[in-house]
DNA sequence: GATGGATGTTCGATAATTTCGAATGAAAAT
DNA sequence: ATTTTCATTCGAAATTATCGAACATCCATC
């Protein structure tokens, strides 16, 4: 089996399994049967001639090679989408603003930050694309996206000459389904030892911050699910799987939309969102609107 | 038909057709029948919902969209190869030197420039990968290659903090099969009006330089074939399709290997080769060997 | 410990995709 | 005008993806 048989589907299945942490959930999300996913995952491993997951019991965990492969897969996939998007709007190029959204950023936050670009006198077309920071940075320097929305600035050590614009910050609140919420609200945060928790993965700023916060208070909750996509966490939280964290600015929205209740706020954690662009002096009107008006939208005190 | 059915094969076929300029030659190189290529190309166009080639008569020419798509395809493909390479040698990471070779650079030149890395006391593994400058730059900043070999420096305007190291330079000579050579050698370069010529594409430094050289002398040869890969040009030249240019340092080798003869030198053109790296202060032993010893290898006077 | 539910995998059969042979039309070459 | 070369269309054959059924494990619970 050779590399040329590699299909975008292989990569996609692999990515979803890696994100969801299980073939069963992945098959659910992809509307496919588990055997298909399992089989395709195996052919992918055969083609690359390497183990992507460590099978310990029925638990799938990414190997080191798997983590590397995942980065590639995300980038390749993102390029595929970018290609499709750009080809169709080659003519309307001036009126569009291509934004890369790091998949750590909650969709609702992204929407609020991007909204200013839609309220211009001359409304422009937003082309959104998600992906890992690495993938998006590649597209930024290739001028395929005008802007990246991320949860951290790009540090000076990197060999990319890009500029960070702080868009706003928010506190972190903890939510859960009504029954769970009422149980843990009484003794917050002290009573969270052993409480079921849904977390962003460690390599995200949010995930690392939350774990640090717990460690500092010598509380060790039971991490039930770990994933990159925050929308997924919200859904699991809504289903009552465990407690989960979200931006304080979204308190009202989360309670209304997902029927969850507020447990408390994680004092001391501030989540910041950044726009990353190639120019310090921003000329693109859409990008300008986003970077200028953003601070108003995420109010600093909530 | 959805994007998920997109196969690496589609992209590969498309790339080869674009390079070769014809389905027939592509099918030859890929050991496939023309109808397969034609069909797959159509499928790709359907999936992307855009015309990649302009069909004027039986001539295929890239559309604007096609050119964009080609860049994406090259990058995606390059990533796929990079993934495969890196996954297998994740452990031996210290001993390997990953080099990206811009596909404009003649293979033989690349070999000469890279040879020093193989003659170290502790020999290391060279991992070579070809691709467009854009694709390779992306891999450089992602630290997937240690070095890029290119025919031009990266200019300060780019948003990548990378450093150029001039490796050497050479003149440009013109060659052809014996019969052609004897015909055009007498009156060189004056008698080249209307002479059949094989050229690197305009967007390469070499191609642009050669065309400028002719324009300056008010000579207009008949461009017979235009392609990126210099090895392909050599092969066509060997077959007697037309005159072609190559680095003067390779005069002896080209005459011996391809049975072609020297027609003359294009005085005034200097072709330069550069190594591009992320660090100004180079620590990687392989990269060090390449950048330090290279100048000796392409002697400046030839 | 045994049991039941959830999960990952294997094995054929079926559906979908890719490839090629034969044939067609149309553009260059002679 | 004739031949050659090229791209495409239309089926059949080969290859690949998907699913249903059955099986093997692991984990929680009784």
Image: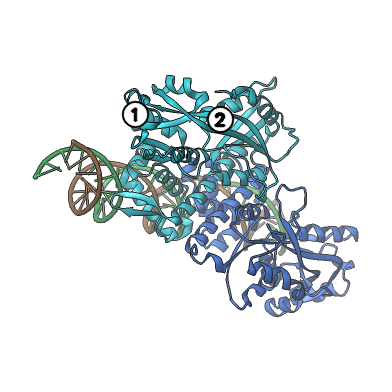
Chain colours: A blue, B cyan, C brown, D green
Q: Is residue A56 visible?
A: no
Quarter of the image where the C terminus of chain A is located = bottom right
Please determine whether, in this image, residue A32 is positioned above or below residue B298. Answer: below
Label 2 vs 1, first from the N-terminus: 2
What percent of the width, then of the height, locates residue B110?
56, 30
What percent of the width, then of the height, locates residue B62?
41, 51
Front residue of B249/B286: it is B249
Q: CA distance from mark 2 to mark 1?
A: 24 Å
Front residue of B184/B156: it is B184
Residue A286 figure quarter: bottom right
Q: Is residue A15 visible?
A: yes
Front residue of B193/A122: it is B193
Give the left or right position of residue B72, taking residue C12 as reference. Answer: right
> What residue is shown with label 2?
B110
Determine the secondary structure under disc 1.
Answer: loop
**Crowd band around label 2 with a 10 angstrom C-alpha radius: few (<14), some (14–19), many (20+):** some
Query: Mark 2 — on which chain does it sit?
Result: B
Tell me whether the residue at label 2 lies in contact with that at label 1, contact meaning CB atoms closer than 8 angstroms. Answer: no
Using the image, tell me which numbered label, if any, was put on residue B160.
Answer: none
> What residue is shown with label 1?
B239
Determine the secondary structure under disc 2.
Answer: helix
Give the left or right position of residue A98, taking residue A110 as reference. Answer: left
């Amino acid at each position: 089996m050779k590399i040329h048989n590699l299909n975008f589907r292989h990569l996609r299945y692999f990515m979803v399994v890696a994100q969801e942490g299980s073939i069963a959930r992945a098959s659910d999300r992809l509307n496919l049967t588990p055997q298909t996913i399992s089989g395709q995952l195996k052919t992918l491993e055969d083609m690359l001639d390497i183990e992507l997951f460590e099978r310990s019991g029925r638990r799938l965990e990414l190997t080191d090679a798997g983590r590397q492969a995942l980065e590639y897969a995300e980038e390749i996939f993102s390029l595929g989408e970018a290609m499709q998007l750009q080809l169709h709007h080659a003519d309307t190029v001036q009126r569009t603003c291509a934004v890369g959204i790091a998949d750590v950023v909650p969709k609702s936050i992204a929407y609020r930050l991007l909204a200013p670009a839609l309220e211009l006198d001359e409304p422009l077309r937003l082309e959104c694309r998600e992906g890992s920071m690495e993938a998006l940075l590649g597209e930024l320097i290739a001028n395929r996206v005008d802007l990246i929305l991320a949860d951290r600035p790009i540090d000076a050590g990197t060999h990319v000459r890009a500029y960070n614009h702080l868009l706003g910050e928010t506190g972190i609140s903890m939510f859960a389904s009504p029954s769970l919420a009422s149980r843990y609200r009484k003794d917050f945060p002290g009573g969270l030892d052993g409480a079921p928790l849904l977390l962003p993965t460690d390599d995200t700023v949010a995930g690392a911050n939350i774990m640090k916060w717990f460690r500092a208070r010598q509380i060790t909750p039971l991490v039930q699910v770990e994933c990159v996509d925050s929308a997924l966490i919200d859904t699991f939280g809504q289903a009552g799987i465990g407690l989960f964290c979200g931006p304080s600015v979204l308190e009202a929205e989360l309670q209304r939309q997902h029927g969850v209740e507020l447990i408390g706020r994680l004092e001391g954690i501030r989540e910041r969102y950044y726009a990353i662009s190639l120019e310090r002096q921003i000329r693109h009107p859409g990008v300008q609107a986003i970077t200028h008006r953003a601070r108003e939208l995420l109010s600093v005190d909530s």
